[in-house]
Image (cartoon, helix red, strand yellow):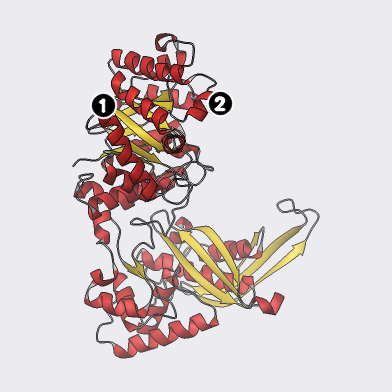
């Protein structure tokens, strides 16, 4: 059976705190959403939100090859006619071939929020659907607060759904608006609704499900609704949405496609899920959630040595599905729990074959365990682990040699960047056959060291200019030692194409930061294939 996919990222997803989609952002997301098999893409609420009105004015609907663009709005206001309601006129003017109208189905909302009668609410549904259909548009009804309303007064809530179909709506979407339902309730209510509709002559109705995640059950509720008879699923990319978010459409698609017999997406569309998830994160400027099912960076990451031993024999023994099916990949996470199998598999990821190299495997395993006992962690610092492996096997390039470094914080009433304090760092090193000593200033000692290091190396390795420090995290270890505790620093860097992480540990945050920073630049140079340079460079030295 075909299950239609209806995406609401551009409207419902945009209501998440921290997301502010521009018109260009929405236009950029449109082909991504279509690429994962969306049958309908809701563009927003024209007439109510100026940015959405602008979006519909600018979008080229012919660019959509398989998906239909929909406009969202409400049924007419009480006391008006659909033909004279300006909000409905704006929906028609949007040019969208599909109009989705939200209607109240909980009698408490009808009487207390709309402040109208149950009879008038049904008339609002009927008049709105009939009028929009008369304008040549396909109509769907979002039955708002359906599950809460059904539990309170099933007869009235059913009547709203029945009126929607009787008026000509193609689909009635059952909304768990407050997100508090549980899967067994959803299955039971949908099943019972179908029986009630059949009793009034509505057989095989096209029902949809729109779930919010306030109880953490949005995806499960969506699957339960499909099992009970719904044929359309609604959700957002990465589960974006207000409060705790909407049902994660990526997880829904993967579950239905890989775990059931329902027809929801082609293998090609399924393979785009991970890429679309990450690209959407860039557009929305919301950091990807690594533990997101199917598409997260940790979705197929394995840490324990026991797992790794089995995975080396058969990867499916510890994976519920093939990560390649959703465009992801398996990776090994290295920690003090790592055995030789874990390290062998992880090294293979960056092109080093340790098979048959027992001495190297033992040396690397011992180095990892000893380092993590001191406070290092490699499960989120792949770049540092690769440097460790290459050092043990003799494949770590030496781009520079550090002679000395220092950083200090001073006070100055004339320093305007950070109140009355500033940091200064000095770095002495050898690179390209010459000695360099450079000074850097910054808001803090780490920024000062970063500037000094960059300045010292830029003539020899101009490739470093493309590398940016993106994130900086500090963790205090052995907290019972107070200010004398060991410090761990995790640094995230990027060259615009790849992101990598390095870790440093020291007696203080500056020492730990220096280690992570230098390792980060070494990895960045190595990643793009730069060879150590020994010829005298152009530019000033010493």
What is the distance, in whole Å, between disc 1 and disc 2 at their CAs? 42 Å
Q: Which residue is mark 1?
A: 62
Report the residue at 42% width, 50% height from top: 217
Q: Residues within 10 Å of mark 1 (few under 14, many from 20)?
A: few
Q: Earlier in the sequence, mark 1 or mark 2?
A: 1
Is residue 391 toward the left or the right of residue 404 in the image? left
Q: Residue furthest bottom?
A: 359
Please tell me whether mark 1 sits on a helix, a strand or a loop: helix
Residue placed most toward the observer, 275 or 499: 275
Quick check: 120 above or below 369?
A: above
Q: Which residue is mark 2?
A: 112
- Measuring from the top left, give residue 530's x and y in whole percent: 37, 66
Report the residue at 44% width, 82% height from top: 368
- Measuring from the top left, give residue 214's x and y in whole percent: 48, 47
Is residue 524 toward the left or the right of residue 451 in the image? left
Viewer-side label of 1, 2: 2
For the C terminus, the quadrant is: bottom right
């Amino acid at each position: 059976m075909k299950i239609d996919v209806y995406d609401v990222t551009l409207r419902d997803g945009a209501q998440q705190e921290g997301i502010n989609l521009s018109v260009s952002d929405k236009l950029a997301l449109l082909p991504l959403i279509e690429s994962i098999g969306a049958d309908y893409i809701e563009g927003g609420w024209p007439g109510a939100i100026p940015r959405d009105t602008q979006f519909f004015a600018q979008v080229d609907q012919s660019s959509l090859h398989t998906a239909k663009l929909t406009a969202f709005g409400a049924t007419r206001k009480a006391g008006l006619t659909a033909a004279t309601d300006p909000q409905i006129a704006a929906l028609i003017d949007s040019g969208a071939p599909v109009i989705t109208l939200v209607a109240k189905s909980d009698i408490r909302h009808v009487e207390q929020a709309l402040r109208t009668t149950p009879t008038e609410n049904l008339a609002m549904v009927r008049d709105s659907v009939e009028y929009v259909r008369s304008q040549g548009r396909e109509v769907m009804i979002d039955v708002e607060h359906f599950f809460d309303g059904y539990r309170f007064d099933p007869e009235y809530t059913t009547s709203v759904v029945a009126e929607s179909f009787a008026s000509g709506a193609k689909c009635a979407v059952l909304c768990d608006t407050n997100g508090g339902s549980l899967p067994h309730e959803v299955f039971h209510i949908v099943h019972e609704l179908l029986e009630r509709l059949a009793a009034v002559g509505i057989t095989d109705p096209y029902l949809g499900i729109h779930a919010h995640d306030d109880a953490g059950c949005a995806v499960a509720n969506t699957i339960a609704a499909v099992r009970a008879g719904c044929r359309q699923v609604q959700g957002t990319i990465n589960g974006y949405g207000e409060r705790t978010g909407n049902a994660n459409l990526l997880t829904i698609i993967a579950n239905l496609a890989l775990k059931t017999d329902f027809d929801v997406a082609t293998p090609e569309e399924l393979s785009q899920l991970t890429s679309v998830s990450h690209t959407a994160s860039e557009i929305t400027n919301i950091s990807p959630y690594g533990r997101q099912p199917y598409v997260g960076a940790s979705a197929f990451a394995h840490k324990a040595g026991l797992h790794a031993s089995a995975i080396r024999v058969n990867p499916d023994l510890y994976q519920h599905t093939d990560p390649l099916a959703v465009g992801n990949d398996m990776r090994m996470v290295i920690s003090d729990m790592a055995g030789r199998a874990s390290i062998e598999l992880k090294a293979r990821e960056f092109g080093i074959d340790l098979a048959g190299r027992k001495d190297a495997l033992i040396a690397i395993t011992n180095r990892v365990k000893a380092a993590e006992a001191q406070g290092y962690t490699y499960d989120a610092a792949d770049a540092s682990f690769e440097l460790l492996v290459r050092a043990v096997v003799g494949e770590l390039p030496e781009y520079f040699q550090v002679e000395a470094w220092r950083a200090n914080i001073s006070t100055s009433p004339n320093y305007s960047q950070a109140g009355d304090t500033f940091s200064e760092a000095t770095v002495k090193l050898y690179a390209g056959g010459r000695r360099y000593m450079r000074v850097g200033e910054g808001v803090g000692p780490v920024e000062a060291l970063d500037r000094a290091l960059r300045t010292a190396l830029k003539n020899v390795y101009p490739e470093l200019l493309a590398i940016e420090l993106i994130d900086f995290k500090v963790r205090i270890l052995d907290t019972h030692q107070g200010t004398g505790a060991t410090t761990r620093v995790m640094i995230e860097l990027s060259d615009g194409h790849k992101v990598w992480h390095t870790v440093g540990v020291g007696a203080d945050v500056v020492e730990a930061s220096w280690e992570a920073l230098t390792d980060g630049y070494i990895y960045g140079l190595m990643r793009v294939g730069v060879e150590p340079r020994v010829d005298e460079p152009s530019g000033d030295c010493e």
